[in-house]
Amino acid sequence: MKKQAREPFDRSGIPDDLCPIATEYIVLKTGEWRAERPVVDRDRCVKCATCWVYCPTQCIVEKDGWFEADLEICKGCGICAEECPHHAIRMVEEQEE
Ligand code: SF4
Ligand code: SF4
């Protein structure tokens, strides 16, 4: 199964005379403002991919024996933890630096 996170936007097809708001592309790193992060219990994960299907930012990545979030893109919404049928994901608070 492939990683879901989309490739950055290809701006090569955008005309030069558009307003900068339409032409400047910034990769949003939602992980920078996340309050909680998902932690997967690898012993409970059965690789059903339910979290992969439901994640709204498409940041769930398949590893050898489990799934986990790409924390650069994960926004900490907790949907994966709610939807995991095996209760393998718990949300933990981010610690302040
Ligand atoms: S939904 Fe839960 S059990 Fe299924 S792949 Fe994701 S973490 Fe594993
Ligand atoms: S917390 Fe939200 S954004 Fe992060 S992996 Fe789970 S569903 Fe995706």
Image: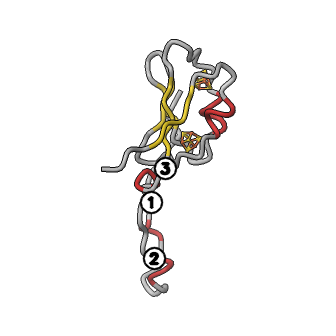
Mark 1 C-beta closer than 8 Å to ligand 2: no
Residue 68 is situated, as x and y percent measured from the top left of the image, at 48, 30
Residue type (three-letter) at the residue carrying disc 1: Leu
**Badge 2 local density, few (<14 within 10 Å), some, or many (20+)?**
few
Looking at the image, tell me whether mark 1 or mark 3 is earlier in sequence order.
1
Q: Is residue 58 above or below residue 32?
A: above
- Up the image or down, 36 lies above or below 38; here it is below
Label 1, label 3: how far apart the Cα atoms are: 16 Å
Q: Residue at x 50, y 25 (%)?
A: 40
User: Where in the figure is residue 73, as x and y percent of width and height?
Assistant: 46, 48
Residue at disc 2, secondary structure = helix
Q: Nearer the viewer, residue 14 or 19?
A: 19
Front label number (2 vs 3): 3
Q: Number of marks in the image?
A: 3
- Which element is circle 1 on? loop
Which numbered disc, 2 or 1, marks the residue closer to the eye?
A: 1
Q: Amino acid at mark 3?
A: Ala
Label placed on residue 28: 1
Residue at 63% from the left image edge and 20% from the top image edge:
48
Disc 2 target residue: 23
Q: Residues within 10 Å of mark 3 (few under 14, many from 20)?
A: some
What residue is shown with label 3?
Answer: 35
- Residue at the far left: name it: 97
The image quadrant that residue 54 belongs to is top right
